[in-house]
Image (spheres, rainbow, N blue to C red):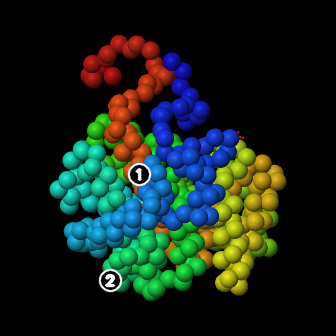
Amino acid sequence: MTATKGLEGIVAAASSISSIIDGVLTYRGYNIDDLAEHATFEEVAYLLWYGKLPNEAELQDLQAKLSDHASVPAGVIEQLKLFPSEANTMAVLRSAVSALALYDDGANDMSAEANLNKAIKIQAQLPTIVAAYARIREGKDPVAPLAGKSIAYNFLYTLLGEAPEPRAVEAMDKALVLHADHELNASTFASRVTVATLSDIYSGITSAIGALKGPLHGGANEAVMVMLEEIGESRNVDDYIQDKLDNKAKIMGFGHRVYKNGDPRAKHLQKMSEELGKEKGNLDLYEMSVRIEELVTGQKGLKPNVDFYSASVYTMLGIPRDLFTPIFAISRTSGWTAHILEQYENNRIIRPRAEYVGPSTQAYIPISER
Ligand code: ACO
């Protein structure tokens, strides 16, 4: 038995939810480029959960359910108030989602219908939790989401406390579409491993949030913004990046385990970053990002991944840096829950083997003789 480091190239599940074939990403067979151009996040969530695009009535029905479930139990809001105001936002989200299970009488109901309803409910509640914590830590009251509005609209509305610009809602919605699912990425795999023991859906999402938090995965979008802030202005880009490259440091937002010729999601975020920069009359972040890409791709052949341009996009939407990864989680909840439902449908516990590289047989020595 020989281990493959990082399970690279190992096919660990059969799935009909999303695919990456020859560098092309599809959700249920629909190219991500088409979905990013034409579909809303709610349509995409429906597609991931039900395996088909909704008609008008089906979409309205889902939107109504998402609206109905968007409020969060008062007990969870009270807990958010008890958390330190400088807490890591992904740790807050991980704890809050775990707490949601305590207020759901059906948390352990394993029927397919109950699990689908919980998927919709968790999807509706996550944005409310993220926005509520962001306000609570600033001493403000949480804002209730508005019925009949999209997740993108309500997230910005409940976070910033005022009606968002249509352009901002459109950009947020597109970002949510682009992050919704991504085959067997680390956090999705973590969620499938957890629920394959027949543990509940809240446990699966809690595991996934823990996995997404790391800077090699979803945490990279925040790390990109840290880098842009450290660079400060365009004239510093070359020295800063050259220093990192010379020291063989990782440049956040570049590289990918599966895509070697570029992440198909990155171009959409790049375009959005440029458009928002033009509208705001400030292209600094966009131009710094483009120069970083020129240097990193030019010298290392590494292409930007989904996290790279999302950092400048979210900043231009007025979102604090430590909410970038929670936004990723809001979107990816649709994919995580779709994968959890798929795992339950055709379950077998996930229990691989390890290549043992420790000492060979040792004689036990009583503690008094050690
Ligand atoms: N900057 C500089 N060098 C890099 C980078 C990077 N961002 N990414 C990979 N490399 C180099 C590695 O140092 C390594 O070089 P070596 O062979 O000389 O040692 C080589 O490219 C292969 O890299 P690995 O880390 O082995 O690739 P792996 O497939 O294990 O990791 C990962 C992929 C984690 C995405 C990696 O590229 C990385 O750390 N990128 C930065 C973090 C990031 O942006 N993560 C988000 C990924 S997308 C997502 O999860 C949403």
Above or below 200: residue 105: below
Disc 2 designates what residue?
141
Residue 189 picture quarter: top left
Q: Which of marks 2 and 1 is in front?
A: 1
Amino acid at circle 1:
Trp
Viewer-proximal residue among 296 and 265 = 265
* Image position of 205 (left or right of 164): left
**Residue sitting at 35 percent across and 84 percent down?**
140
Name the quadrant of the C terminus. Answer: top left
Residue 223 image position (x, y, % from top left): 58, 61
Q: Pointers 2 and 1 in contact (CB under 8 A)?
A: no
Mark 2 vs mark 1: which is more N-terminal?
Answer: 1
**Residue sitting at 71 percent across and 73 percent down?**
274
**Residue sitting at 62 percent across and 58 percent down?**
34
Tell me, yes or no, if residue 211 can be seen here. no
Above or below 27: residue 242: below
Q: Which residue reaches farthest right? A: 298
Tell me, yes or no, if residue 34 can be seen here. yes
* Image position of 366 (left or right of 153): left
Disc 1 designates what residue?
49
For the residues marked 2 and 1, what is the alpha-carbon distance in whole angstroms? Answer: 33 Å
Above or below 252: residue 360: above
Residue 362 picture quarter: top left
Helix, strand or loop under label 2: loop
**Residue sitting at 56 percent across and 46 percent down?**
29
Helix, strand or loop under label 1: helix
Above or below 269: residue 110: above
